[in-house]
Image (spheres, rainbow, N blue to C red):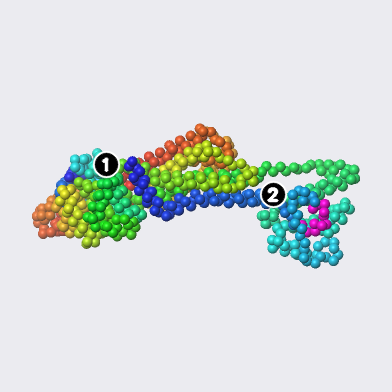
Amino acid sequence: MMWSIITRKELKDALRDRRALAALLVFPIMGPVMIYFMFNMIIDIAEEAGEVSLPVIGAEYALDLVDFLEQNGVEIERVSLNAAPDPEGEFYSQAQLDEIRQGIRSRRFDYVLVIPPTFDELISASRSSNIELHVESTRATSAPKAGRVRDFVQAWGRETAALRLIARGVNPEIINPVTVVRIDVASQQSRVQSVLSMVPFFVIMAAFICGMGVAVDVTAGERERKSLEPLLVNPVPRYVIVIGKWMSAVLFSAVGLVLVMVLNFFSLSLVPLEEVGIVFNIGRLEIIGVLVTTLPLALFAPAIQVFVGIFAKSFKDAQAYLSFIMMLPMGPFFYNMFNTQDREFWMSFVPMLGQHMLLTDVVRGDTPDIIDFVLAGLSLLIYSMIFVYGAAQLFKRERIIFT
Amino acid sequence: MIEVQGLTKRFREIVAVDNASFKVRDGAITGLLGHNGAGKSTTLRVLYGLLKAASGKAVIDGIDVMKDPLKAQSVIGVMTDSHGLNPRLTAREHIEYFAQLRKMGRAEINKRIDQLIVTLDMEDITDRRAEGFSQGEKMKVCLSRSLVHDPRNLIMDEPTNGLDVMTTRSVRSILQNLKKDNKCILLSSHIMQEITALCDEIIVIAEGKVLMQGTLDDLTLRTGESDLEEAFMKITRGAQG
């Protein structure tokens, strides 16, 4: 076939172009790597928050409290101070307090619970005692842990108060008219979702980025190199040339698309998602479905780019236009971010929005209807044809040979 | 054989070719002589099917170029005014590409390229990438890709422009050989020396109009001048005044 001669020549040329190859490979690799690291970060944070280890000074003065904390899964780390204690023994000496402060600054511990020597004495006398929680609040890792420790200590306080009231024959409910029970509906999960929602974005971007260099080079680039006029004196219909050139960009875009999807799924399978309570399993049917719907993106993006490349007066011109067009994939991304409505029928026909929704469904583990796949794929196919037809019309203009 | 009748081409208000008529016969080299901007390139571009004339007719080997440009293109070899190459493709790949676009078979292509390499003396650049080719080397690639399908008609826009003496001479001898093969050759130039050395027939063009066609002797005789340059000046001065 005539167009394949043109495609083959353009591919040969592009494959020798290190810049085009770099564009093809760098982006599809970058996205999945980013996703992998972001997930691991989320999981690390989740794990750290799960097991709280608490440095305690003066644990021996509050045996009951320490027991309570340990029962609640807090790992007590007994810290002893080197500085000289106060001879009076009521509380810690200035030197000891300085040592605590120094310990937090030098990251010997992120935060520390300081129990005064008089604690048990006061508590058993049914009195009240201060407890100090030293925190560096700007340190991101310590704040959530310190918050949990404070909750535990307060819970112990409430329990103690209740026991005291019961001992005096008073119903503890009198001083506890309301208890707030906080039920965490997996805040980790929503964080994971927001990372997962980047997968469709990367896939759509890949379709645009991976073929762009080739699309511009074979159109505006050829004009600028002054190699277009010699090409046009060959007895080949213009639309055949346009199709040949378009297909070369399509192949680059398709390779990038498949690469980014495979790598994304691969990097998601490497992340221990079950640790944050996400079941990520994508069946063979979904993968085929996603490929079938998104591959038309590899026709669509180069179709626009070839159209623009032929329309533009120069290489620079084309690049300027295309940097605007690069914004297009962000449209559906933001739309879906703020759109809380359900899917509506017309959305399948909006280029990229349909694909975006399908991909979002699949990475979330939902299975969209077959009809949605078909509509989104077909409409994109039609848009691609319209742009290629337009490109062929532009390519027939006489002024194409003048630079 | 190329026949042009009453050809007119306008770009908006500017008349680039104005009612031009001429004939280019087989077995001869015909030169289109004119100043820069006289309409040489535009005329040739109409002939090789890249521009549509507003009126008039151009017929190549009996094929009407306006009606069937692709068919006309299949019987001509063209060396355009632009000589751009793909820097990452070799000389051989450039020639191969055009041969494939002209639907030649693999064996035929290889045979033809081997021939062209010898005739144009380009063994050293055949498998080198075009990046860094000299002007002469580029022209050789362009010339060989326009000759690869062994066309009966050859249209060349300033074929020796920017070439050194050695390459110019080899291009001339190639053209002389093609002429012996009874090909129809039309080339444009603004260099008198070039035309005198090569052409059997001369078409003088100025401001889009064909002012005179004939052999070198015809032109000098009709103007009463001793050489082409003087004759050319006299003919074109008439057009301007």
Side of A367 where A306 appears, left or right: left
Provide the residue span drawn in magenta.
A56-66
Q: Quadrant of the N terminus of chain A?
A: top left
**Residue A189 visible to an observer of this rendering:** no
Is A295 or A335 nearer to us in this picture? A295
User: Which residue is located at x 80 percent, y 57 percent?
Assistant: A59
Is A61 contained in the magenta span?
A: yes
Residue A82 is situated, as x and y percent measured from the top left of the image, at 77, 65
Callout 1, which amino acid?
Answer: Leu
Q: Look at discs 1 and 2 and give the one toward the viewer.
A: 2
Which residue is identified by label 2? Answer: A50
**Number of numbered discs visible in the structure rendering:** 2
Residue B65 is situated, as x and y percent measured from the top left of the image, at 23, 42
Quick check: do tags 1 and 2 share a chain? Answer: no
Q: Residues within 10 Å of mark 2 (few under 14, many from 20)?
A: few
Asked if residue B102 is positioned above or below residue A57 in the image, the reply reads above
Is A167 or A64 nearer to us in this picture? A64
**Residue A6 visible to an observer of this rendering:** yes
Is B8 contained in the magenta span?
A: no
Callout 2, which amino acid?
Answer: Gly
Q: What is the number of the mark on residue B70?
A: 1
Quick one: SS at disc 2? helix
Side of A163 where A267 appears, left or right: left
- Please report, as a chain letter, where disc 1 is located: B
Q: Which SS type dominates the magenta stretch?
A: helix
Side of A185 where A238 appears, left or right: left
Q: Name the residue at the front extreme.
A: B107
Residue B97 is situated, as x and y percent measured from the top left of the image, at 31, 48
